[in-house]
Amino acid sequence: MISYISATYVHPVVGPPIKNGVLAVGPDRAIEAVFTAEEAKERKIRNIKYHDGLLVPGFVNTHCHLELSNLCYQIRRHTGLPEFAKSVIRSRTSDEYEIETAMLKADIEMFENGIAAVGDISNQLISRKFKNNTPIHYHTFLEIMGFNPDKAKEAIARALKFKEEFAPLPVSIVPHAPYSVSKELFAELRLHQEEMAGMLSIHNQESADENAFFEHKTGGFLGLFEFLGQDISFFEAPGTSSIKAFLPLISPGLRTLLVHNTYTTAEDVAFAVAIHPNLYWCLCPHANLYIENKLPDVNMLRAAGLRLTIGTDSLASNTRLSILSEMNLLQEHFNVPTEELLKWATINGAEFLGLASEFGSFEPGKRPGVNLVDFTEKDGAVILGDKVKRLF
């Protein structure tokens, strides 16, 4: 039986919002059709359930660390990334029950907050069995690390074994960050592009210390390497920002998600788009404030016409796993129009994850999930509220 639902506005995302539009949703939760109010009236559709609010597709969270969910409220704010990384390492536990319980709660939270698909970072195997039994679609990014060039082949061998153990779940082996992956390990990754499922995710310019490390071999990452007991005397700073150092090492044929971009400049953006045609740029604003107490230059990124997505990062660096909450923050600080934000939160993320045939928009045949979001109107503009209810 087909369900018909309507709201103040229906946002297909691939087209303009439809005032008093009507969604036809099949018994398998697939979108059957999207009607204007006039089309629904012409077809004499009955039993329409009306709602006050916005009907939007399920959200796509392109960057999360589910396995850090047990660290909520355990890490101090505003420490900067190197100190934050030390705190995460100190706080990690081997208590599987604690981690699994926290992951379950986090997954339920994301589902209730209308998140339909997640790009999730994993450094352990612990989330595998969990991801087999959840209504959320997960694509796992198995992070590879190794700044010592002599350990590159060893690191890729571990990652390949790790990927086998995650089967049959969808997985990509990806570099963690430019400061944790050697040129030799980037080269090994290029030799194993088939292990990436067509996409790559990497943390980018989350901290000023990252650029300082690549420009002058200075900053907080020197202390982090000392904390880790790693000798990096072999490393010579290339004298450029980090993105200029690592992006040429990545295949331009891969859909590549640059995560955070807190300290990315217009010059960095111009360089990046000139050499890589398949870039996506992920914003995790609450995590940026939590760790660095700074936000990316979002209006500069918008003006450059970039494909933006939204992530929550982890509960180690956030107090909620809510894409709507991230959109609220972006709208508050940068006055981003709701239609634009919704593209970042849905179709752009679905396209990056290779899931646009199923998620990201209201189009016949898709099963994107259906969320009801409250809103207000101010000077003719739609302002997102902070409440979301999953309808399908």
Image: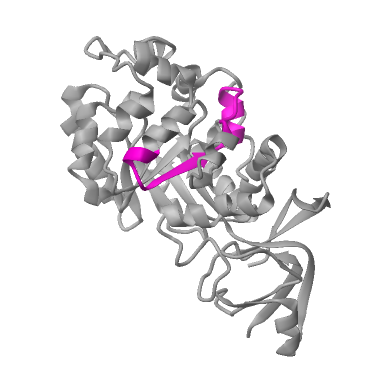
Q: Is residue 106 above or below residue 17?
A: above
Front one among 18 and 57: 18
How far from the left and from the top, in percent, is residue 247?
32, 34
**Residue 296 is a magenta residue:** yes
**Residue 256 in view (yes/no):** yes
Front one among 82 and 240: 240
In the displayed structure, does residue 349 sit left or right of residue 199? right
| Extent of the magenta region | 273-297
The number of numbered discs placed on residues in the rendered structure image is 0
Front one among 108 and 277: 277
How far from the left and from the top, in percent, is residue 13?
59, 61
Quadrant, the C terminus: bottom right
In the displayed structure, does residue 221 sit left or right of residue 296? left
Q: Is residue 72 above or below residue 111?
A: above
Q: Is residue 62 above or below residue 31?
A: above
Q: Residue at x 44, y 23 (%)?
A: 89
**Residue 94 in view (yes/no):** no
Q: Residue at x 60, y 55 (%)?
A: 111
**Residue 320 is a magenta residue:** no
How far from the left and from the top, in percent, is residue 263?
50, 25
Q: Quadrant of residue 76?
A: top right
Q: Residue at x 45, y 17 (%)?
A: 209
How far from the left and from the top, in percent, is residue 388?
71, 54
Quadrant, the N terminus: bottom right
Colour pattern: one colour
